[in-house]
């Protein structure tokens, strides 16, 4: 992977978007196995309905992992200095997540050239599911 160079990046530049397939029960089962998070609200329809949800829904950290993939598709993981996110909505079955990022600031800190990236994970209807920001070191 050829990481972008600090001098070539401008405020307002967009990261290549990461479009993902629709969330389905298989996605949730695979994430349960990979993460060890077997919370029944994500995999047990009866449990979800008892919690007054219409169906199971995606783990918030699954969408967070997708944002991590967005970043590491742009730069190597070793260049990611910080990621902060907040959950803003539930990702339901059938939702198709798309992760995006926009460079919002360029600066120097701790002897490194860095950029701040606004992060967003939204579904196919444009509804935000996660928002956040990342700090990335560039050369």
Image (spheres, grey):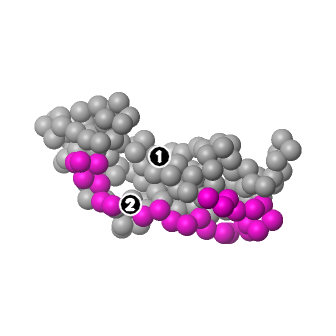
Q: At which x and y percent is residue 58?
A: 32, 46
Question: Where is the N terminus found, in terms of image quarters?
Answer: bottom right
Q: Residue furthest left?
A: 46
Q: In the figure, is residue 6 to the left or right of 36?
A: right
The residue that appears at 52% across and 48% down in the rendered structure is 68
Residue at image coords 29%, 54%:
23
Query: In the visual, does 16 lie left or right of 23?
Result: right
Identify which residue is drawn at 26% across, 41% down. 29
Q: Is residue 7 left or right of residue 49?
A: right
Rendered location of residue 80, percent (x, y): 65, 46
Q: In front: mark 2 or mark 1?
A: 2
Quarter assignment of residue 52: top left
Q: Residue furthest right?
A: 111
Where does the image place residue 128, in percent across and percent down from the top left?
44, 58
Instruction: Identify the secondary structure beneath mark 2.
Output: loop
Check disc 1 and report the residue beneath it. 64
Q: In the rendered picture of this protein, how many numbered marks are placed on residues?
A: 2
Q: If the image is split into quadrants, where does the C terminus sit?
A: bottom right
Using the rendered image of the protein, determine whether residue 91 is visible from the camera's viewpoint: yes
User: Circle 2 is placed at which residue position?
Assistant: 20
Question: Which label was assigned to residue 120?
Answer: none
Seen from the viewer's position, the closer of residues 127 and 81 is 81
Residue 99 is one of the magenta-drawn residues: no
Neighbour tally class for label 1: few under 14, some 14-19, many 20 plus, Cα within 10 Å = many
Principal secondary structure, stretch drawn in magenta:
loop
């Amino acid at each position: 992977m050829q990481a972008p160079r600090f001098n070539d990046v401008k405020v307002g530049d967009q990261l290549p978007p990461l479009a993902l397939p629709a969330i389905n029960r298989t996605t949730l089962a695979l994430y349960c196995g990979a993460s060890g998070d077997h919370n029944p609200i994500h995999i047990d329809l009866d449990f979800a309905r008892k919690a007054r949800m219409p169906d199971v829904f995606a783990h918030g950290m699954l969408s967070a992992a997708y944002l991590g993939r967005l970043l590491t598709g742009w730069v190597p993981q070793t260049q990611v200095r910080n990621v902060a996110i907040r959950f803003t909505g539930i990702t339901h079955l059938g939702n198709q997540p798309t992760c995006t990022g926009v460079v919002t600031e360029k600066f120097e800190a701790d002897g490194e050239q860095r950029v701040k990236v606004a992060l967003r994970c939204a579904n196919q209807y444009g509804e935000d599911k996660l928002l956040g920001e990342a700090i990335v070191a560039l050369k």
